[in-house]
Amino acid sequence: MAPQSRRYLRLLFVGLVLWMVLTKLPYLFLRLSFSMNITNTANEDASTDRNSKDDRKVAQEKLLLERDAFEGYAPSPVKKARGRHTYRSDGLLEVNPKGPHPIFELVNNAEKAWNEKLRKASTSLDEAIGEYRRRYRRNPPKGFDKWWEYVQKHDVQLPDEYDQIYSDLEPFWGLEPSYLLELQAEREFKQDTYTIGKNAEGKLDILQTSFQEGAYDQLIWIANKVLDILRDIEDDLPFFRATFTPHDGPNLMTDYVVKSTLLEAASTDSSDIGKEQLPPIHRLGWLSACDPESPARRIDFNLDGPRPPKPKKSFIHDHLLTMDPCLHPHLFWVHGQFLSHNTGPNPYSTMIPEFSSCSTSLHHNIRFPTPYGWIEDILPRSDDPDFADKTDERLLWRGTNTGIHHSPRTRWQSSQRDTLVRIANEVNGTLEYLVPPNPGYEDQPVDNPKTARRARLNPAMIDAAFVRGPSQCVEPTCSQMKQIYEYKNMQSMKAAGNYKYVLDVDGNGWSGRFKRLMTSNSLVFKTTIYPEWFVDRVAPWVHYIPVQVDLSDLYDSLIFFRGDSNGEGAHEELARQIALQGREWSKKYWRREDIIAYFYRMFLEYARLMSLNREAMTYQGEGELHLDRWNKDKVIVQDPLLH
């Protein structure tokens, strides 16, 4: 290259360097200053009280805005969520990666539905009677006006929301009353039952027990608790005899065709079915209770084979529907209620009126509001700090390995509690979770799941363990369990109260700790197959977080609220809000008076059902049918078993 050309290139290079120094150097100094300020702010964060977290965040964002304004920075357009999630008829929301994180709309939809339910609640006896007639197409039972007086006197909320009673009792309306009485009388002498009702003097009493020798004290205590609750309304209850099972779970398997036949007879009021008119049962085990067109009847039911497929990512939008194994046959593979009996027992040839603390969509036990586990409050209150003051951000679960008998002949490794403790403590492999958006970016697409190592995620996310050592087991399984699980000591209430997030899981039956957990200031996550008496009176995503029994959505929901292992994407304010609403619900909708109101109405209905003269046991007062209040002209109650 010629000397003159090299001289020109050197001059050009020097000029370019001078231009960059003169135009960009001030910016670089200021940007460094902004970065140092932000870093200093972060360092100061570590030494200040965590309650000022929001103020510090605002200060940092202000510095970033000042920096952007200086450099003429224009952020690149944020991709907006354009996709819609699929709300399936089986109660699941199937995630569309192009849509926003689904928990936002699940919470929003649930709040709207709950507020609408509150708005439409009856405020007078006349409205309550009209609403009863609209829902159930018959008059209320005799004594309904007295029941309404109790509801008003004790400020019982949502006086129309007793569809669970209707669902439990309606099939029995298809049976002849004389046959029903015969079935109930026979059941009184079935081993492990007790019968309560009114004696000849009109007083509530334990009328009959059928327990094994030496089991009386162990099994009778719940009956005494029920009688204690009913004393407040003893004089207003009609004569009745009600037989209960004292055990945790349901025991009366249903045949789909039998139940369908009885519901049809009940809806027409044309005839009552006796023993001879009942259709033959189908001996298909668990599947006997399912509609022939349901998903469960269309699979190859082999517990040794793979589970039926599920969507890759999904959440619950209707908790009741997701408890039904006819709609979700994978439940047969993952819950001890079903695994304990393999492909299941055959159904009864009829439907028997017996009460139990819980039931499933495959059983026809009548639910009652068991007093087991009920508390008024957590005391002392210092054991339950406010959500923001709780120091442990992990999800807590402690309990015994109930839910299934552990032996070489059972599939205990797949039961609900064993699965929880195993996956929560797994350190090998990876898992996928949906990345929650940071506040202010809620309308971004949720996108595809992110992969994380269990060894990093689990210790930061979940504290789940069995306590006290193996139980409900035989050798060599007991020894095998000791090798698999680290059994820990029981926690004190004060220690448990430090956790922001708690999980409720079924045991041998329904969970008796749900009331206590809901009364706390922690956010409750709940997984279950047992619809309880309050199912119409509580709102998932408003009062607690529903979780699928296979726990496939547990990490997605937990990470949305508490953030990932670094705390990124946390929505703690929403978590605090739902936790507070859950406690308020427990204190307002699950009082002793609310339990009494449910028992009161249930036994009014039951006494009429079992009467040889049902018309005489029907309320004869006035009341209007307010169809316009709901803009509907049909019964809204549907049995989830009949699809």
Image: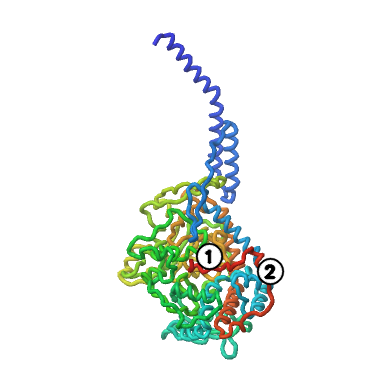
Res 325 seen here: no
Q: Residue at x 47, y 78 (%)?
A: 351
Q: Position of residue 338 (x, y in %)?
A: 40, 69
Total labels drawn: 2
Q: In this orientation, which residue lies closer to the viewer: 630 or 329?
A: 630
Disc number placed over residue 48 in the picture, else none: none
Question: Which residue is the extreme one toward the front?
Answer: 270
Q: Position of residue 35 (x, y in %)?
A: 54, 36
Q: Is residue 599 left or right of residue 411?
A: right
Q: In this orientation, which residue lies closer to the viewer: 616 or 425?
A: 616
Vertical relation: 88 (above or below) 264: above
Q: Which residue is mark 1?
A: 517
Element marked by disc 1: helix
Q: How is the image coloured?
A: rainbow
Q: Is residue 203 left or right of residue 424?
A: right
Which callout, 1 or 2, points to the residue nearer the camera?
2
The N terminus - image quarter? top left
Precedes in sequence: disc 1 or disc 2:
2
Q: Position of residue 330 (x, y in %)?
A: 40, 62
User: What amino acid is found at the position of numbered circle 2 in the picture?
Assistant: Thr
User: What amino acid is found at the position of numbered circle 1 in the picture?
Assistant: Leu
Q: Are marks 1 and 2 in contact (CB under 8 Å)?
A: no
Where on the picture, by quarter, is residue 533? bottom right
